[in-house]
Amino acid sequence: MPVRRRGERQWERGGGGWGTMPAAFSGNRLGRLLLLLCLSLSGGSPTDLVSQELKQATKESVSNVTFVEYEVLLPGVSGTSIEKNVTLDSATRIELSCRLDNKYSHLKSLQVIWKRGNETIRHINKTENSWSIQLRILDNSNLGSYSCTLKGEEEISAMFHLQVPTIEGKEKPIVSYEGDTAVMICKSSGYTPIAWTWYMTNGSEQIALNDSLLADKYAINKISANVTHLKILKLTKEDDGVYWCEAAFELGKSKGKLMLKVLSFMVPLKPFLAIVAEAVILVTVVFLYEIYSKKKEKHAEDEKEFDQVEQLKSEESNGLENSSTRQRKT
């Protein structure tokens, strides 16, 4: 469904926080001395004046933050729910609005409920078919899910998920071999983290990786404010595991997950060795079959020769017997 991001105003930060110093603080020294003199003559207290100015400065520093508006257009179809992710990295004044499409303006007696989680919160009716809440997001305790629900003849809802920027890692495992170097990259698109931190998971514990202490093992390079590289040198099987890159923003922290798989050099050789073993077995079987066939042929030839010799002997023996018989008859 269409989602609109409406007007946005960006205020600049002053040196002491959000906003600029009040005009009272920027006057010249002579003017301030005259002001304090007049105040003292009238019975007022200079301390009260300074306190009042500080309170005003604090109030302005809180109010002068980025202001953004997000609006979703509700379709008017019963049972439907729209979800919208809203990314925030710094203190923000925000307005969230749910507006019913004009073609469903005939719906009457609508009950509108805004909630943060399960807690009902107050809202305002901007127009006849639009309802809003205004929030000050000053820290991560204000983040979370905010929903608007319209109940009447039909029930329609929308959900806003307020969250810190997500970190882009690598979904597929990084595969490398023992002794090699692995490089892992994390990015924060569109938002600049205050700081980056790398961790490795060891069981249920996360160990922070410090390249200054282990310079011969890790090298952490900040390519730009939005990109960080972790280089692991001289890989071993102990380096195999899950790694996390953590980006710190003003409103909270966000993590990216990466996996490293370290293989032994024997791993890629296994298929080759298996093929070689199969080839050796095949050659051996063929060789043994050839030997067996030759032996069988030789044995058959020997038997044939033996039969021929025996036959010749038998024929010679019969010839001698016939010859002796003829000689007796004569």
Image: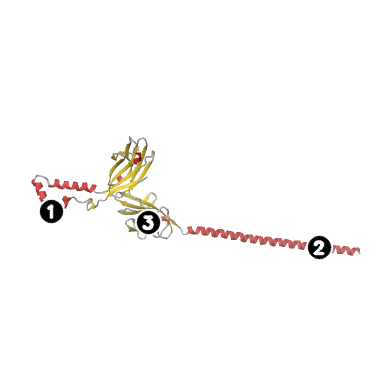
Could you tell me which quadrant the C terminus lies in? Answer: bottom right
Residue at disc 2, secondary structure: helix
Q: Give whichever of 22, 229 is nearer the camera.
A: 22
- Hey, what amino acid is under mark 3? Ile
Q: Which residue is mark 1?
A: 29
**Mark seen at residue 165:** none
214 on left or right of 66 = right
Q: Nearer the viewer, residue 13 or 156?
A: 156
Q: Residues within 10 Å of mark 2 (few under 14, many from 20)?
A: few
On screen, residue 277 versus residue 144, left or right, reads right
Give the number of the disc on residue 315. Answer: 2
Q: Earlier in the sequence, mark 1 or mark 2?
A: 1
Residue count near mark 3 (Cα–Cα under 10 Å), binned few <14, some 14–19, many ≥20: some
**Residue bearing mark 3:** 185
For the residues carrying marks 3 and 2, which lies nearer the camera in this image? 3
Q: Is residue 117 visible?
A: no
Q: Kindly identify the residue that appears in the image at 28 percent across and 43 percent down.
A: 134
Q: Is residue 28 left or right of residue 67?
A: left
Mark closest to the chain's N terminus, 3 or 2: 3
Say which label, 1 or 3, has the lower sequence index: 1
User: Does residue 306 appear in this view?
Assistant: yes
Closer to the eye: label 1 or 3: 1
As measured in the structure, the alpha-carbon distance from the residue carrying label 1 to the one carrying label 2 is 150 Å
Mark 1 is on which residue type? Arg
Query: Most extreme residue toward the right, as rendered?
Result: 330
Give the quadrant of the N terminus.
Answer: top left
Q: SS class of the residue under badge 1? A: helix
Q: Position of residue 288 (x, y in %)?
A: 62, 60
